[in-house]
């Protein structure tokens, strides 16, 4: 559960979002980051990619699949040092990888600040290596940026959220350059849509999706 102060979280986030949008526009001329920061999921130059870790990737996938402007979400592993890791290896916490979702989006329909707003608003970014009962470095809160704009906006957004007092503890989300991504096994993809009746989906994933649709109703994909 997120530990939010009584301050209106949405008001704080919206004010930060407006400021960050302005910053993003000022940084549109910045050069691309390292070669490794290029998207590994899209061949379409009109789309961008960002990689999020926010606990179990089933939850992250389910939320961003329903977000307007998001074209594709792939669950996988990122941020570690073991090549082609298997799920069981990642769960042992010895690969350095986090469970992540690589989110491919249309920047004409959704901005980086808006993606970050949903990211920070649908998990607890103050718990180190943990989301609820999911414990371990593989469940850490992380942003792996793919270009300089994402880096600048994420770092400034994080600093403003911390200083705003939206959370009663410091945000521990790591912000690092994207270096690798290994898609998870097929049975992990589109997991909530395929396995929504399972207990974990009902008690952990579904509440996050419902929260997203309620709190961020204006960002939900139109059916």
Image: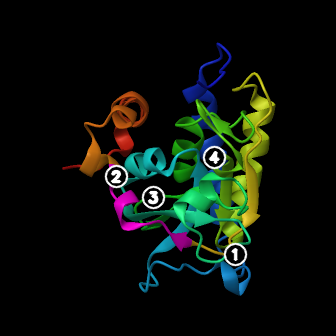
Foreground tag (1 vs 3):
1
**Disc 3 designates what residue?**
110
Q: Residues within 10 Å of mark 2 (few under 14, many from 20)?
A: some
Q: Is 196 a magenta residue?
A: no
Label 4 or label 1, whichever comes before in sequence order: 4
Residue 148, image x and y in percent? Answer: 71, 71
**Disc 2 designates what residue?**
191
Residue 105, image x and y in percent? Answer: 44, 66
Res 136 → quadrant: top right
Foreground tag (3 vs 2):
2
Label 3 or label 2, whichever comes before in sequence order: 3
Highlighted magenta segment, given as a residue range:
182-191
In the picture as drawn, the residue positioned furthest to the left comes out as: 223
Res 180 → quadrant: bottom right
Q: Is 196 on the left or on the right of 26, as rendered? A: left
Label 1 or label 3, whichever comes before in sequence order: 3
**Disc 4 designates what residue?**
139
């Amino acid at each position: 559960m997120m530990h939010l102060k009584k301050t209106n979280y949405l008001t704080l986030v919206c004010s930060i979002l407006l400021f960050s949008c302005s910053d993003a526009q000022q940084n549109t001329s910045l050069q691309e980051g390292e070669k490794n920061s290029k998207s590994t999921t899209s061949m379409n130059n009109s789309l961008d990619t960002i990689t999020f870790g926010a606990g179990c990737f089933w939850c992250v996938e389910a939320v961003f699949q329903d977000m307007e402007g998001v074209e594709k979400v792939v669950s996988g592993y990122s941020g570690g040092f073991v090549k082609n890791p298997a799920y069981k290896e990642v769960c042992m916490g010895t690969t350095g990888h986090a469970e992540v979702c690589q989110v491919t989006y249309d920047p004409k329909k959704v901005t980086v600040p808006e993606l970050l707003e949903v990211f920070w608003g649908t998990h607890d970014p103050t718990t180190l290596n943990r989301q609820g009962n999911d414990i371990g470095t593989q469940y850490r809160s992380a942003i792996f940026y793919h270009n300089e704009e994402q880096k600048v906006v994420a770092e400034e957004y994080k600093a403003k959220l911390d200083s705003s007092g939206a959370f009663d503890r410091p945000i521990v989300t790591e912000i690092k350059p994207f270096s690798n991504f290994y898609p998870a096994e097929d049975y992990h993809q589109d997991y909530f849509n395929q396995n929504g009746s399972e207990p974990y989906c009902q008690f952990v994933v579904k509440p996050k999706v419902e929260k997203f649709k309620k709190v961020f109703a204006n960002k939900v994909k139109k059916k």
